[in-house]
Image (spheres, rainbow, N blue to C red):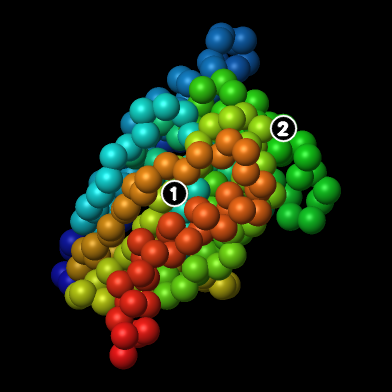
């Protein structure tokens, strides 16, 4: 790809990030002035920002399925940090993230001001985050979690952790499974995944020096949480996402 085009892509992204920082600074100012600035407003502005951020990324996005019209706990597979803007543009959403993200330069502050909930692994605060998630859902606010707990290369799906599903049961809201798949030249994209010890700058440069990849986002049928145990609910959501991502491939393998 011509170098000038790579630079143009990076400049566009930096411009969008600058816009996001301006919004975050505005939220901080409102907080200091004690001006009402609820989560619903943060979600609306976050969606507006995510749409512009996703447009600055080198992807062509296709969305299949019907978006929910009532608040739900969204759950999906996790491939890259790019999942967040690509999904965040679909609806006013808050995200659950690992606590380390809060310390990241720029991105951590943006996430905090957008209303992200943070969880520390193995820190014994699972009950606290469960109450926070439940209250979030009871306030008619959508929440997106990645119950695998980490990113993958897109070739497999890890176990969905049931403890993160408890908030949907407590709040009495359905679970909305989401499957996201990255492709390039008809195959699974080897560039888009953000895994292991990868760093953000190197990942961005790899993405921006390549032609646009394709992303398929499948909004699957909602799953009722009424009368279900969290492990069963997590497994049902996991299998819905697994079939959406790999169902046809697995059936072909069995037939062979």
Judge by depth and name the residue closer to the eye, 239 or 180.
239
Residue topped by disc 1: 177
Q: How dense is the environment of label 2, judged by Cα within 10 Å: few (below 14), some, or many (20 and up)?
A: some
Coordinates of residue 217 in the picture (x, y in percent): 31, 53
Q: CA distance from mark 1 to mark 2?
A: 21 Å
In the rendered image of this protein, does residue 139 appear above or below residue 252?
A: above
Kind of element beneath mark 1: strand
Residue in the foreground of this view, choosing between 100 and 23? 100
> Residue at the right extreme?
124
Dot 2 lies on which element?
helix
Q: Is residue 160 visible?
A: yes
Image quadrant where residue 247 sits: bottom left
| Residue 32 quadrant | top right
For residue 74, above or below residue 244: above
Pick whichever of labels 1 and 2 is earlier in the sequence.
2
Q: Residue at x 36, y 49 (%)?
A: 220
Residue 201 can be seen, yes or no: no
In the image, residue 234 lies at what x, y percent?
58, 53
Query: Which residue sits at x=50%, y=48%?
Result: 75
Q: Identify the residue under disc 2.
A: 131
Q: Badge 1: few (under 14), some or many (20 or more) residues near its Cα, within 10 Å? A: many
Q: Comparing marks 1 and 2, which lies closer to the viewer?
A: 1
What residue lies at 28% left-to-right and 40% top-to-bottom?
Answer: 66
Percent across and percent down for residue 164 are 65, 47
């Amino acid at each position: 790809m011509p170098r000038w085009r790579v630079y143009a892509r990076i400049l566009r992204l930096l411009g969008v990030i600058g816009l996001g920082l301006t919004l975050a600074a505005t939220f901080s100012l409102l907080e200091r002035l004690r001006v009402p600035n609820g989560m619903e407003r943060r979600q609306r502005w976050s969606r507006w920002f995510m749409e512009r951020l996703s447009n600055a990324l080198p992807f062509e996005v296709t969305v299949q399925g019907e978006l929910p019209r009532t608040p739900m706990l969204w759950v999906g597979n996790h491939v890259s940090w790019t999942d967040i803007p690509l999904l965040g543009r679909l609806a006013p959403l808050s995200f659950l993230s690992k606590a380390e993200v809060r310390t990241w330069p720029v991105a951590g502050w943006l996430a905090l001001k957008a209303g992200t909930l943070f969880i520390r692994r193995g820190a014994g605060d699972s009950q606290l985050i469960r109450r926070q998630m439940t209250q979030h859902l009871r306030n008619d606010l959508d929440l997106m979690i990645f119950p695998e707990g980490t990113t993958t290369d897109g070739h497999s799906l890890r176990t969905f952790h049931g403890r993160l599903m408890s908030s949907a049961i407590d709040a009495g809201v359905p679970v909305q499974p989401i499957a996201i798949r990255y492709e390039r030249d008809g195959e699974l994209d080897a560039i888009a995944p953000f895994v292991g010890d990868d760093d953000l700058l190197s990942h961005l440069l790899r993405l921006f020096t390549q032609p646009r990849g394709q992303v398929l986002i499948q909004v699957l049928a909602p799953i009722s949480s009424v009368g279900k145990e969290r492990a069963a609910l997590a497994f049902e959501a996991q299998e819905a996402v697994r079939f959406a991502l790999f169902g046809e491939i697995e059936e072909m393998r069995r037939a062979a």
